[in-house]
């Protein structure tokens, strides 16, 4: 009696897992496309053309263009987590984690995961003048990122690893400015020297990266 | 005999001047629109709707969408000159001019000339992944801006107004990073504190602005 039930469950599980993989593959393509054509350039028709999937197949995953945009942001957030946040979180000291977050971001840019550089910088620039659910989702990502940098900066200051002034919010504004400029010049010119210039700026702000 | 000729010339001159004013008014509207909808969102049809002009009237000024985009960039460059570069050029000392260029840019943002903030940051983000004449024109603007900052920084260093290290290119990368972050956060959140944070970063890099 248990055999057929167990088989059914495994099949259902495999189907769910296939569905998840296919959904992720669609969203990976969507996220790459969005960094060049914009999130607004994503349409279910256009994405069908790029991925070779049927429009009806895509509609089965996403009910509207906005749902597709929001799901693409969530997928880019997962990629950012795996690429940037997770490796940095292994650092328990404040300064080491702050440096790791910044440096892993620059390394992420250098790996050319997205053709347009940082997904969130690209779609943030596109949506800054468009209030709504998509902009809110981007703002939430950004607030979380800033909060993680500020927490690391505060910890580093409390431990005396870096000077107390400027305060953590101002310091993080300046760090994030270097990262954004690294993204912007690298996306514009494709010259890895931009990433090195951002790193040099970080050294001026934070001192050398702890080994 | 001279009276009619002089009248004709004055009329022709007035017509040219009217034509120039109307062209500038169209391009001002186009530049504002482009900072929110993108340069690619500019169409002769859409602009006709926004300005209340006829499509045929607009076609008389611009032969194609690309011509309209290039003319919009040139008009934004004129505005940037008047708003940012011209006031700074009255400063003959290197450090005073460097500070003035950066500070006039932040003041320009604070005057909300364009709803999407800095025209060139907005359209630069849009076109980084689209090689062609439009991107080339944006790159030229950007190279000129960087060259003007680097010249002022070099002059300030040669005069001993600021330390010799980092070199002028690296220093300008860090200055421009603060300006870009000021634009980005102000465009995203609309909070003038962003511009103040950029100014604080400049003070850390350059010392107080010479009075």
Image: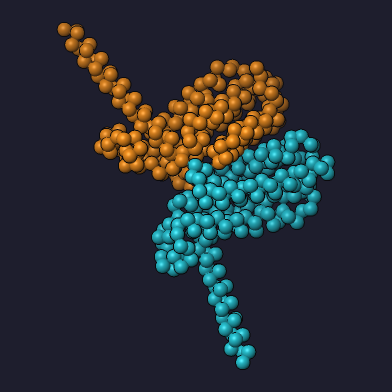
Chain colours: A orange, B cyan
Foreground residue, A155 or B163?
B163
Residue at 70% across, 30% down? A204
Foreground residue, B92 or B9?
B9
Residue at 62% across, 18% down? A93
> Left of A210 or right of it: where is A80?
left
> Which image quadrant: the N terminus of chain B?
bottom right
Residue A12 point in image, percent of width and height: 25, 19
Residue at 33% across, 39% down? A49
Q: In the picture, residue B49 is in which quadrant?
A: bottom left
> Left of A28 or right of it: where is B113?
right
Residue at 49% across, 37% down? A116
Residue B168 point in image, percent of width and height: 73, 40
- On screen, residue B160 above or below B29: above
Residue B193 point in image, percent of width and height: 62, 43
Identify the residue at the far front of this view. B132
Identify the residue at the far bottom of this view. B1
Note whether residue A176 is visible: no
Residue A132 point in image, percent of width and height: 42, 43
């Amino acid at each position: 009696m248990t055999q057929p039930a167990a088989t059914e469950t495994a099949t259902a599980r495999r189907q769910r897992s296939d569905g998840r993989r296919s959904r992720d593959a669609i969203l990976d393509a969507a996220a790459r496309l969005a960094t060049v054509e914009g999130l607004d350039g994503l349409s279910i028709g256009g994405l069908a053309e790029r991925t070779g999937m049927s429009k009806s197949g895509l509609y089965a995953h996403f009910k509207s263009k906005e749902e597709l945009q929001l799901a693409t942001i969530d997928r880019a957030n997962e990629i950012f987590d795996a690429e940037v946040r997770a490796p940095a979180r292994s650092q328990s000291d404040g300064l080491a984690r702050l440096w790791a977050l910044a440096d892993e971001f620059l390394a992420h840019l250098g790996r050319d995961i997205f053709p347009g550089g940082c997904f969130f910088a690209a779609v943030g620039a596109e949506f800054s003048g468009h209030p709504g659910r998509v902009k809110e989702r981007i703002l939430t990502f950004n607030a979380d990122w800033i909060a993680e940098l500020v927490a690391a900066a505060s910890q580093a200051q409390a431990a005396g690893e870096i000077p107390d002034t400027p305060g953590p919010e101002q310091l993080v504004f300046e760090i994030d400015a270097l990262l954004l400029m690294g993204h912007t010049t690298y996306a514009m010119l494709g010259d890895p020297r931009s990433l090195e210039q951002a790193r040099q700026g970080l050294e001026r702000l934070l001192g050398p990266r702890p080994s």
